[in-house]
Image: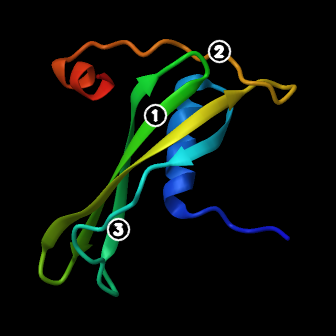
């Protein structure tokens, strides 16, 4: 039976695939705790970025933001972390490009 991937998983996959240039799979997801509810009718945005890169794995953070367009109110709702692994054409873990730490913010997130 085919099941649709949850949206956060799709966003994490797109981010990891863009960094690695390869097919990626989800290995783990940290706890997803909501800080504030997403109300019916609000627009939801997800911002993903690479936080850490190992040999074949990447940690992707996702920040979810909800917007009430009528009230023009934007609020963060949750943050979560996905561990993704790049796969080669044979389905084995593949080495990914290194993560260039060019800002203090990237260094902080990497640590």
Quadrant containing the C terminus in the rendered view = top left
Give the residue pinned by disc 2: 95
Marks 1 and 3, Cα distance to the nearest angstrom?
Answer: 22 Å
Quadrant in the rendering for residue 50: top left
Q: Would you place residue 82 above or below residue 68 in this image?
A: above
How crowded is the residue under tag 1: few (<14 C-alpha within 10 Å), some, or many (20+)?
many
Give the residue pinned by disc 1: 59
Of the image marks 1 and 2, the number of the one nearer the N terminus: 1
Q: Would you place residue 17 above or below residue 44 in this image?
A: above
Q: Is residue 15 left or right of residue 89?
A: left
Give the residue pinned by disc 3: 44
For the point 70% across and 19% down, the residue is: 94
For the point 13% across and 73% down, the residue is: 73
For the point 57% across and 27% down, the residue is: 57
In terms of secondary structure, where does tag 1 sit? strand
Disc number lying in front (1 or 3): 1
Residue 108 marker? none
- Between 98 and 21, the residue placed more toward the observer is 98
């Amino acid at each position: 039976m085919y099941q649709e991937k949850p949206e956060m998983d799709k966003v994490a996959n797109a981010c990891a695939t863009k960094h690695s240039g390869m097919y990626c799979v989800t290995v783990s997801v940290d706890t997803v705790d909501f800080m504030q509810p997403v109300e019916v009718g609000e627009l939801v945005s997800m911002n993903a970025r690479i936080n850490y890169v190992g040999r074949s794995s990447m940690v992707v953070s996702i920040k979810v933001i909800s917007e009430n367009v009528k009230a023009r109110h934007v609020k963060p709702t949750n943050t979560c972390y996905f561990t993704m692994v790049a796969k080669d054409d044979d389905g084995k873990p593949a080495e990914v490009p290194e993560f260039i730490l060019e800002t203090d913010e990237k260094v902080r997130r990497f640590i």
